[in-house]
């Protein structure tokens, strides 16, 4: 720091003020200091700085499945918002393991992150542990049962409702749902929306058309094959996540069915590979980038309430958008 000050022609205290974000450093001096830092390849000791100011300007993000491209899309929103506010981000993948999630949260806490954004793994009980109350934490996407504040997610009940109503409006009555893990709130709420839409239309919900359980490609393929081989198969299937959709499409190809002539298909989320499918898949698209930004903003409100003029003690639910592709159409025959 002495060398930077000498090269920039300023005092050590002025260099320190710039590094610590003090507003009193003029732009002319700030530019001279930045140029000197670059010339000398000087990097401030962030650990020492964090001990002095009580913050690391770093947050942690824990997601359950990095291979599910929904979460990287959310993470882009988090990272952009965090960077704009001067924060660095550490990303962890719990691999759908409650134990890995607990270890990662403990590690992030030991590294003195200022707060954490968490999409819970299946079976997570973090909100019941002392760790949940030890530092600022905001839930994103997956919200533990009973949580009434500090969370950002899609309105999944509405998403399930509008997905099912779209198919009903086309004339479908035999609609199946690859529901995913209904212990997780997004899937449980989509199932709730599905039931509401069917009830409003006066249509029965048949147990053999409801397929809860796994969330992987193999699960989608296996469950779809069972549905297509049923005595009275469905005329439309909804997949509750992208991996289930891929499995569903594989089973349809294996059974030599045509979309939407033989079977209508509807999914949640729009993926990078969606544009390469023929026909394009009708989907309820979640506002992934906005989810990430809003989640960070809520967390920043918990970390620095004096800086962020918003109440972090709430659950924010963002609306999904139905985007109609070529994968849904009228049923091939009148349901009997």
Image (spheres, rainbow, N blue to C red):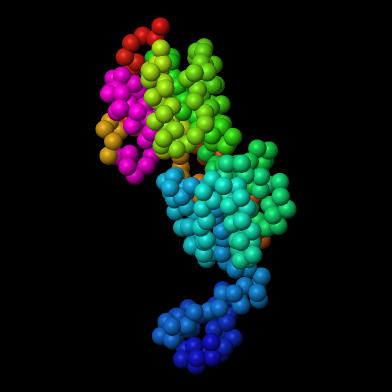
Q: Residue at x 35, y 28 (%)?
A: 251
* Magenta-colored stretch includes residue 336: no
Residue 61 percent coordinates (x, y)? 54, 55
Query: For residue 283, what is the image quadrant?
Result: top left
Locate residue 256, reporting x and y percent.
27, 23
Q: Residue 301: tell me if it is visible.
A: no
Q: Is residue 19 above or below residue 88?
A: below
Q: Please tell me whether residue 250 belongs to the stretch shown in magenta.
A: yes
Give me the residue at 59% from left, 86% from top: 13
Q: Residue furthest top?
A: 336
Classify the position of the C terminus by image quarter.
top left
Q: Is residue 259 left or right of residue 196?
A: left
Marks counted in the figure total 0
Q: Is residue 316 above or below residue 260?
A: below
Q: Is 183 displayed left or right of 288 in the figure?
A: right
Residue 191 locus on image (x, y percent):
53, 27
Q: Name which residue lies at 67% across and 41% down.
A: 147
Could you tell me if residue 17 is visible in this image? yes
| Rendered residue at 66%/76% (across/down) | 52
Check the image and report above or below for 34 versus 222.
below
Q: Position of residue 68 (x, y in %)?
A: 44, 45
User: Which span of residues is magenta-colored?
Assistant: 246-275
């Amino acid at each position: 720091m002495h060398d930077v000050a000498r090269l920039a022609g300023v005092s050590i205290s002025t260099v320190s003020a710039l590094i610590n974000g003090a507003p009193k450093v003029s732009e002319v001096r700030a530019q001279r200091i930045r140029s000197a830092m670059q010339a000398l390849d000087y990097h401030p000791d962030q650990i020492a700085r964090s001990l002095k100011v009580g913050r690391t300007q770093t947050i942690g993000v824990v997601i359950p499945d990095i291979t599910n491209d929904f979460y990287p899309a959310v993470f882009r929103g988090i990272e952009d918002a965090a960077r704009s506010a001067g924060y660095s981000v550490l990303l962890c993948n719990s691999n759908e393991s409650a134990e890995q999630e607990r270890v990662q949260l403990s590690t992030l806490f030991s590294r003195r992150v200022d707060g954490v954004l968490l999409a819970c793994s299946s079976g997570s009980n973090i909100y019941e542990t002392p760790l949940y109350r030890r530092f600022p934490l905001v839930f994103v996407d997956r919200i533990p049962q009973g949580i009434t504040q500090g969370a950002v997610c899609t309105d999944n009940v509405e998403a399930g409702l509008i997905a099912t109503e779209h198919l009903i409006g086309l004339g479908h009555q035999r609609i199946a749902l690859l529901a995913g893990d209904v212990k997780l709130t997004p899937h449980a709420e989509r199932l709730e929306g599905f039931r509401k839409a069917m009830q409003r239309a006066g249509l029965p919900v048949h147990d053999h058309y409801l397929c809860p359980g796994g969330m992987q490609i193999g699960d989608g393929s296996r469950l779809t094959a069972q549905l297509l081989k049923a005595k009275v198969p469905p005329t439309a299937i909804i997949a509750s996540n992208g991996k289930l959709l891929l499995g569903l499409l594989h089973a349809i190809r294996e059974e030599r069915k045509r979309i939407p002539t033989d079977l209508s298909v509807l999914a949640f989320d729009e993926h990078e590979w969606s544009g390469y499918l023929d026909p394009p898949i009708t989907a309820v698209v979640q506002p992934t980038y906005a989810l990430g930004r809003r989640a960070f903003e809520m967390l920043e409100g918990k970390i620095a309430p004096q800086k962020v003029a918003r109440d972090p003690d709430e659950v924010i639910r963002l609306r999904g958008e139905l985007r109609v592709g070529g994968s849904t159409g009228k049923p091939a025959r009148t349901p009997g």
